[in-house]
Amino acid sequence: MRFAGIVITKDVGKTTMAGHSDQHETVSKQTSRAGIASMAVAFALSRGLSRTEIETVMELPNVLMVDPESRISDVAVHRLCRTLCDREPDVALPLTMASGAPLEQLSQSVQHAENLREAILFLCRYRQTASDRLLHGFRETESSGTFWVEHPLDHVDLGFMGLFALGLFKRISKEVVSKPVSLSKVSSRFPAIGPPEDYERYFGCPVYFDAAETGIVFPGRSLDMPLRFANSEIFKFCNEYYSQVLRNLGHSAQADDYDRLETAIAENAKLGIFDTSSAASSAHMSLRNAQRVAASRGTSLKDLIKQIRSSIAKELIRNLSFEIEEISRSLGYSDESGFRRAFKSWTGQTPAEFRNPLRRSNEPISEVE
């Protein structure tokens, strides 16, 4: 909510003047597992690029000798994929790569999940083991589930790696789900790389380009389909293993999910939206998963929303230029009396009582004769 020059940010309890910031932006590590790069390099070699060309594009000498478990710059992989697109613009290269790429250990682990939903959530939870800035998300309604992917460098490779990820997941689901999965639709934020009809043939559903997001939509009934190689003990081990990998990288899956949920609630607050379903949807989680994430911090989803709502209310009340009726409306209350009751339950004071000391401190000092 941009409110008379004030921006409500994720850091609840703070307001920052529009155009100014009192916080420093955290710079990401911006790396990917070298195993991802090795996969792209092998594909580039199969498409006729020489080792010298690959190393020049990626700006990585001896790239073929890199330890697959090490980390390399994100941009190197995206540059290589862009070069492939420029060389063969009429070929659906992301699908060609997805069809023949060896499965990474993370991709192999999902086959032991109980069902398709758990497999998707597993990929979302441990996505940063593949790339620090890779975003996977999952949101679920009564009729469908959407698995989406995004990376800040998608514009560099024209969405190549995003389409590759969707193509790879389609291939994995075909191999491990007990029954054939019919997709509802697939979308990409970028124009098609190669013939659009090749994508519809590969995914077996309508595919939309220049769309709002890059993702796959599954019918809701397919999410509970059991996987052929489901094994609770092996899957538990995989979760423990990748949790440790994240810790070694300086990440925490639960902390990352909680941060994403908190951000979504604060973003919804800008629109005056404070219900639990919208919070989960905006965080690209199922409602059940959002409730689990909140519980991991010893709270409930409803109480987390209430906490953020009250923090925003107190900040806005502190700004004497805002009328209480205006604040009440912006926070989603249909009438001012409802807001007054809620505010008193949060602070033990009415909005006017909370504001009175602030008014006195802002009164001009009379000149003594």
Image (tube, rainbow, N blue to C red):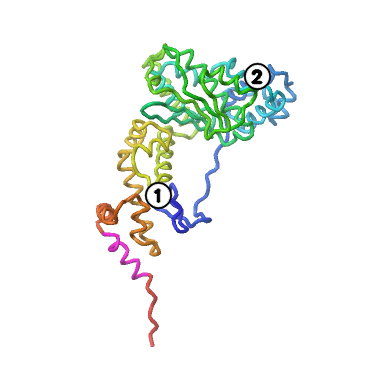
Residue where numbered disc 2 is placed: 43
Residue 260 found in image quarter: top left
- In percent of width and height, residue 289 lies at 36, 31
Q: Nearer the viewer, residue 138 or 104?
A: 138
As displayed, is residue 368 above or below residue 195? below
Farthest residue, direction bottom: 369
- Label 1 Cα neighbours within 10 Å, binned few <14 / some 14-19 / many ≥20: some
The magenta stretch spans residue 357: yes
Q: Nearer the viewer, residue 119 or 299?
A: 119
Left or right? Give the position of 89 relative to 309: right
Q: Nearer the viewer, residue 27 or 203?
A: 203
- In percent of width and height, residue 76 lies at 65, 31
Q: Amino acid at mark 2?
A: Phe
Instruction: Give the magenta part as a residue range.
Output: 350-361
* Residue 12, numbered circle: 1
Which one is earlier in the sequence, the residue at label 2 or at label 1?
A: 1
Left or right? Give the position of 155 relative to 320: right
- In percent of width and height, residue 10 lies at 43, 47
